[in-house]
Amino acid sequence: MSSKSSPRVAFITDLKLLALCDRVPIIRHRASITNSLICAYNLLDKVTVIPSVPATEEDIRGFHSEEYVEFLKTAEADSEDVTEDEFGLGFDCPVIDNLWPMVCQIAGASLTAARALTSGQATYAINWYGGWHHAQRDSASGFCYVNDIVLAVRQLRVKFDKILYIDLDVHHGDGVENAFLFTPKVMTLSFHQLEAGFFPGTGEKHDVGCGKGRHYTLNVPYRVGINNKQFIYLFERLVVARMFE
C-alpha cells in the first residue's frame, strides 16, 4: 500500500501530558509505564505524534457545571475549605495541588485527538492516556476528575452528525452514558462487569436511554469469569455484525 493511500494515524503524547497523568493518585505512573511499552515496540514509528493542547476553561465548561469547574480551579490539598467528598472528591479522587492544570491537560489530550479527526489531519486518532469515563457533570468519580470522552464526543459532533461510543472497560461507562442519555445523536455501548459491590454498580441491560434517546443506550453486563471466546462472541454479534447489515 502506498503512503498516499495509507490511513493517517495520529498518536497524542508529550512529556507534559505524561508527567501530569502520572500524578493521578491510586494509578500513579501508569501513563509512563504505558508509554514505555509503546516505545519498546517501536510503535511510534508507525504513527504521527501530535503533542496535546491543554483544554481551556471554556472547553471544560462545555460539559462540566460552573460550580464544579470553579472548585477544580481553586481546590488545593490540605485546604481547610475542602470537605471530604465535596463534588465527589474523596478516597479515589483526592484533592491534590495543581489539580486544575492536570485536568486541563488530560481533557486537552482527547480534544486534540478529536480535532485531528474533525480537521482532517488524521484518519484515526489515539489518546492512550484518556478514557476517564466516570466523571459526572458536577462531580468527580472513580479516579476521574474530568470526562474527557464527553468533551471529545462534543468536538466530533462539530463534523459528524452521529457518534457511536464503544466502552470496553471492565467498569460501566456511567458518566458518558448519563451525558448522552436523552439524545439520539450519540449511541453509547458499554460492555462491563456488573455484580453486587462492583463499581459503579450501574449499567443494567434494561437501561436503554430516555426520551428521544431511548434505544440509543446499550448496556452489555457480564459476570466475573467471562472468557475471551464469550466476549468476542458478544462483541461480534452486537457490533461487527450490525456494521455490515
Image: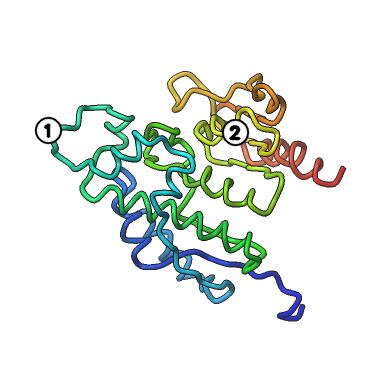
Q: Residue 112: x percent and y percent? A: 51, 60
Residue at 52% x, 23% y: name it.
202
Q: Quadrant of residue 56?
A: bottom left
Residue in the foreground of this view, choosing between 150 and 10: 150
Task: Give the CA separation, mark 1 to mark 2.
Answer: 36 Å
161 vs 126: above or below: above
Picture disc at residue 133:
none
Categorize mark 1 by other alpha carbons within 10 Å: few (<14), some (14-19), many (20+). Answer: few
Check contact, mark 1 vs mark 2: CB within 8 A: no
* Secondary structure category for the residue under label 1: loop
Quadrant the N terminus occupies: bottom right
Q: Residue 126: x percent and y percent? A: 55, 59
Give amino acid for label 1: Glu
Left or right: residue 239 versus residue 205 is: right
Categorize mark 2 by other alpha carbons within 10 Å: few (<14), some (14-19), many (20+). Answer: many
Residue in the foreground of this view, choosing between 48 and 197: 48
Q: In which quarter of the image is residue 5?
A: bottom right
* Secondary structure category for the residue under label 2: loop
Left or right: residue 72 versus residue 244 is: left
Q: Residue 33: x percent and y percent? A: 38, 59
Q: Residue under circle 1? A: 80
Quadrant the C terminus occupies: top right
Residue at 38% x, 36% y: name it.
66
150 vs 184: above or below: below
Query: Disc 1 or 2, which lies upstream in sequence?
Result: 1
Residue at 51% x, 73% y: name it.
42
Give amino acid for label 2: Phe
Q: Residue under circle 2? A: 180
Residue at 40% x, 59% y: name it.
54
